[in-house]
Amino acid sequence: MSGVSFRVTLADIVLAVAISRQAERQLAAVGAGDLAEFLEVPAAAAFDVTPAAALAFFRAKGLRPTFSYADMEGAAHDHAFAVAKLMDLDLLAKVRDSLDEAVAAGTPFGEWKKTVEPTLRAAGWWGERPMTDPATGETVQARLGSASRLETIFRTNMQQAYAVEAWRGIAETADGAPFLMYDAVDDLRTRPLHRAWDGTVLRWDHPWWKTHFPPCGYQCRCGVVQLSADDLATMGIAESAEPPDDGTYRWRNPRTSITQTIPDGIDPGFDRNPGAAFVVQLERLAREKIAQIASPETRAAAEAGLASVARRTFTGRAASILADLADDVQRAGRLAKFMAAGVVEYVAASLQRAAPSAEAEVAFAALSEADRREIQRRIAAELAD
């Protein structure tokens, strides 16, 4: 037999066993929380975003006491900060404020935990105790504060805040760098499908990112890398021919009994891109402020500047169409109605010649026949340009 041969002695085997046992003892000495902290990727590392920049989205949230994680779905989390079973508004505000400080300073989980855990313990929000479910009136043994819950609260809010700000930066620089590459951590904690998505390259406005922009679930540490055409050439990679198609599953909300279709590999509530929704919200607020400018010349210049940014995205183009349609004597009322997330999603999907989601179809169908006809006319004109 040709090739390189290896001679293994009994002494080699004894040494290997000794090293293995030593490693096992060291691993056993490390607590689960410490091991997770060791393996953790900071939220800021998943996206090229500074802590200060991530604050805007987090500080825009209000407070909403909830009993169950399922009491708030999807877009509701963009507007309100909530911790399941934390019904005390003052205590909820303290947790939110502590996270605000952590986001601003880029504080790691271990340090944040040291500051917030004593506050929760002192308030009696720790461990388990009986609580009455306001929706059913039943008394249940509720799980309150714990180390694992604090980790979920911290990482979910941190990662979402960074992801939202990352999307704003992506939208602003998309002309020069229009591609996104899914970037999984690829270690023993990475979900199998997230590992399979690693290296997927698609245009930043591809519909796949509407449901697969990280974080894609609780404790998800994935991120994206924004690339230009030159970057792809230098790295020797190409845009993916098709996005991953891993199927879907049906999830029934235990509180509302509403059933949703969610892509496999995505946790319920994470099948959306909060950054895109936040951009629409900011554009809406900007348009409302622009409408109050007294000088016609200044107002026109501000509208042109907003349009130059907004129209880079399908969502932005949809928001522009709907805002223009709402610009009449009933503007305030129509704007709120047209800017509903489902209506914006319907128009954005139509501009991409893609099928809108069932939720978007329902939202669009709820408009008056005249409004639907006018929106369809504007979509057709946009596609003809």
Image: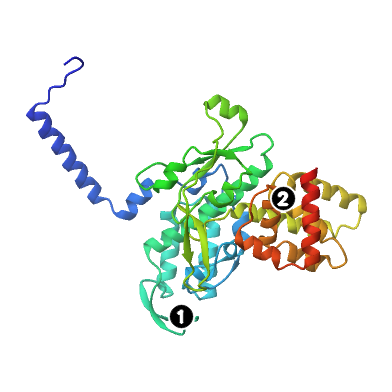
User: Quick one: label 2 or label 1, which is nearer the N terminus?
Assistant: 1
Q: Residue furthest top?
A: 2
Q: Which residue lies furthest to the bottom in this view?
A: 137
Give the residue displayed 12% in from the left and 29% down from the top.
Answer: 12
Q: Which of marks 2 and 1 is in front?
A: 2
Give the residue displayed 16% in from the left and 21% down from the top.
Answer: 6
Q: In this view, does 375 lie above or below 234?
A: below
Q: What element carries label 1?
A: loop
Q: At label 2, which amino acid type do we have?
A: Gly
Which quadrant of the view contains residue 233?
Answer: top right
Residue 133, numbered label: 1
Q: At label 1, which amino acid type do we have?
A: Asp
Q: Give x and y (percent) for residue 28.
A: 23, 50
Q: Can residue 247 be seen in this view?
A: yes
- Give the residue pinned by disc 2: 316
CA separation, marks 2 and 1?
40 Å
Which quadrant of the view contains residue 187?
Answer: top left
Q: Give x and y (percent) for residue 278.
A: 65, 55
Q: Nearer the viewer, residue 127 or 72?
A: 72
Give the residue displayed 56% in from the left and 62% down from the top.
Answer: 74
Q: Give x and y (percent) for residue 184.
A: 45, 42
Give the residue displayed 77% in from the left and 68% down from the top.
Answer: 368
Looking at the picture, the colour scheme in use is: rainbow
